[in-house]
Image: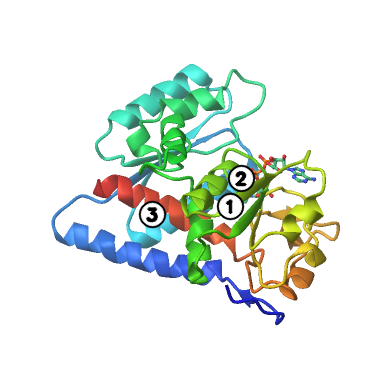
């Protein structure tokens, strides 16, 4: 590992995601030129959560750029679990749909059960990689759709060109969509992995031992720059507004960049990679 005290190199997720989108566009074009239909991603949005609307719009826009057709379903927040499951079933059976994305969270207050909805999606069309079958496959190290954010983090990490084997990774956060799956992917690459969470006794000491730090917490600048081991790689998943309303990650960026060898910025690090990996998962489901 390139241990250094110089300020970190920035892992540019925006640039990498654009390269991935360009490559996907070429692959889609090649399929179309061979007379095959376009890949299709069904997006399902229930209710009026403004952030969810923005996320889905960005995902659909990215699909448009690479030639993936989106089949968009916008449902009233009162539609209910049974009707939602019926739609998922219809999409499972639709040959023009290769990937299905149900935007979470589902509205509060109805009879919605997110886990049951995720489990109803055909695992082969599971563009988000949240189906319990695919999560089980990930645990067993078998090939299956991988959740988009962890998959994007691994692509960013690969940009550093480091030999990961035997190195120590510390993951802060244990959510099903980021913390746990990224820990499994790092383990798959033969790293020694520590998972920290809200009950961890001495977070500073744990982070201080890490060659690779992944912060996925949702607390602005929780990981202090002076905790970071010199020469470490810092991957910041957090997207938070600080007290001044500025977008910041879970890591104290400027101080951490003084010690790390590589670091992802917020915005422009992990975020754009998540969308790129959604498209990649959709294309892989289509190509399979
Ligand atoms: P979550 O709320 O599901 O999980 C947060 C985790 O952090 C929990 O496991 C909890 O134990 C841990 N935690 C909370 N307080 C802690 C503390 N003081 N010390 C140590 N651990 C603590 O969150 P999530 O869905 O995994 O998302 C985490 C962050 O990443 C959020 O800011 C979210 O917006 C962001 N996010 C970004 C992307 C992206 O594409 N960049 C994708 C998903 C999530």
Q: Are marks 3 and 2 in contact (CB under 8 Å)?
A: no
**Badge 3: few (under 14), some or many (20 or more) residues near its Cα, within 10 Å?**
many
Distance Cα–Cα, label 3 vs label 2 = 21 Å
Residue 98 position (above or below residue 46): below
Mark found first going from the N terminus, 2 or 1: 2
Residue positioned 62% across, 29% down in the render:
107
Instruction: Look at discs 3 and 2 and give the one toward the viewer.
Output: 2
Residue positioned 49% across, 54% down in the render:
190
Residue positioned 74% across, 67% down in the render:
253
Residue 89 position (above or below residue 239): above
Residue under pointer 1:
192
Report whether residue 250 is seen: no
Residue under pointer 2:
179
Location of residue 150 in the rendering, given as x and y in whole percent from the top left corner: 53, 51
Task: Please indicate whether residue 168 sits to the left or right of residue 131 in the image.
Answer: right
Distance Cα–Cα, label 2 vs label 1 = 15 Å
Location of residue 247 in the rendering, given as x and y in whole percent from the top left corner: 73, 60
Mark found first going from the N terminus, 3 or 2: 2
Mark 2 CB in 8 Å range of ligand 1? yes
Nearer to the camera, 7 or 76: 7
Q: Are marks 2 and 1 in contact (CB under 8 Å)?
A: no
Quadrant for residue 2, please give it: bottom right
Label 3 sits on a secondary structure element that is helix
Residue under pointer 3:
280
Label 2 sits on a secondary structure element that is helix
**Badge 2: few (under 14), some or many (20 or more) residues near its Cα, within 10 Å?**
many
């Amino acid at each position: 590992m390139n241990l250094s005290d110089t300020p970190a190199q920035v892992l540019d997720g925006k640039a990498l995601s654009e390269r991935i989108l360009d490559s996907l566009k070429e692959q889609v074009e090649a399929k179309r030129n061979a007379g095959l239909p376009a890949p299709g991603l069904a997006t399902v949005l229930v209710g009026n959560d403004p952030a969810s609307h923005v996320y889905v719009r960005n995902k659909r826009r990215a699909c448009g750029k690479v030639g993936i057709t989106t089949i968009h379903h916008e449902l009233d927040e009162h539609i209910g679990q049974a009707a939602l499951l019926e739609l998922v079933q219809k999409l499972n059976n639709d040959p023009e749909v290769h990937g299905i994305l149900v935007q979470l969270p589902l509205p509060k207050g109805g009879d919605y059960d997110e886990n049951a909805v995720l489990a109803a999606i055909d695992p082969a069309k599971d563009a988000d990689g949240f189906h319990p079958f695919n999560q089980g496959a990930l645990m067993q190290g078998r090939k299956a759709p991988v959740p988009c954010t962890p998959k994007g983090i691994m692509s960013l990490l690969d940009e550093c060109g480091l030999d990961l084997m035997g190195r120590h990774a510390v993951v802060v956060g244990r959510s099903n969509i980021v913390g746990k799956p990224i820990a499994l992917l790092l383990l798959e690459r033969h790293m020694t992995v520590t998972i920290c969470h809200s009950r961890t006794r001495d977070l500073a000491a744990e982070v201080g031992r890490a060659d690779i730090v992944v912060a996925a917490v949702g607390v602005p600048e929780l990981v202090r720059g002076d905790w970071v081991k010199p020469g470490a790689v810092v991957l910041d998943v957090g997207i938070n507004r600080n007290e001044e309303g500025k977008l910041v990650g879970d890591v104290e960026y400027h101080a951490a960049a003084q010690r790390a060898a590589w670091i992802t910025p917020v915005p422009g690090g992990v975020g754009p990679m998540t969308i790129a990996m959604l498209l990649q998962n959709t294309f892989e489901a289509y190509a399979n």
